Amino acid sequence: MVRISARAMPARVEVRTFAAVDADTGAPSASPEPQVCRTLVSPGTVCAAGRDGAGIAVQLPTTLAPYVVLYVEWYVPESDRPAGQPTADSRAASYGFHLG
């Protein structure tokens, strides 16, 4: 399990795993293996995300490559969108973890 600090539950959480990264840059050196997690609005089956006392906990699959990137996306209600950006209906962030 990994945890991210966030107040709102994301609409989408995707886990991308990598077997290796470049030693100098830290950039993934192979293609990712993306997996969608189950959330309140997303029916993923390999992992699950939910709120807990410390933020958002992501229950990861039991077999993973050692490098994990979480791609997290939140829906932005129309009333909370920036002025002049009525189509800005989501915000996203990525988090990297080394589980080795």
Image (cartoon, rainbow, N blue to C red):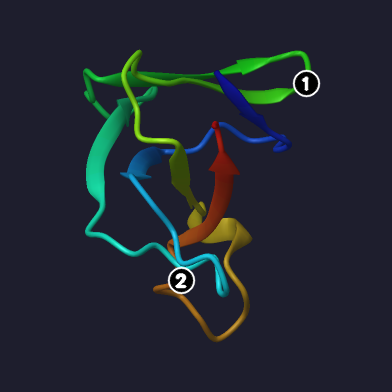
Indicate left or right for 63 with 88 as reference: left
Residue shown at 40% from the left, 38% from the top:
13
Is the Cβ of the residue at disc 2 closer than 8 Å to that at disc 1?
Answer: no
**As displayed, is residue 63 above or below residue 86?**
above
Residue lying farthest to the bottom in this orientation: 84
Q: CA distance from mark 2 to mark 1?
A: 28 Å
Rendered residue at 33%/28% (across/down) = 37
Left or right of 54 in this view: 34: left
Residue corresponding to mark 2: 88
Image position, residue 56 (x, y; %) = 62, 26
Q: Residue at x 62, y 80 (%)?
A: 83
SS of the residue under disc 2: loop
Using the image as rendered, state which of residue 25 and residue 40 is in the foreground. Answer: 25
Residue in front for this viewpoint, 71 or 11: 71
Name the spot of residue 30 as percent of width and height, x first.
Answer: 26, 60
Q: Nearer the viewer, mark 2 or mark 1?
A: 1
Q: Quick one: quadrant of the C terminus?
A: top right
- The kind of residue on which mark 2 rests is Ala
Please identify the quadrant where the N terminus is shown. top right
Residue at mark 1: 54
Residue nearest the observer in this picture, 45 or 30: 30
Would you say 63 lies left or right of 86 here? left
Q: Position of residue 49 (x, y in %)?
A: 47, 22
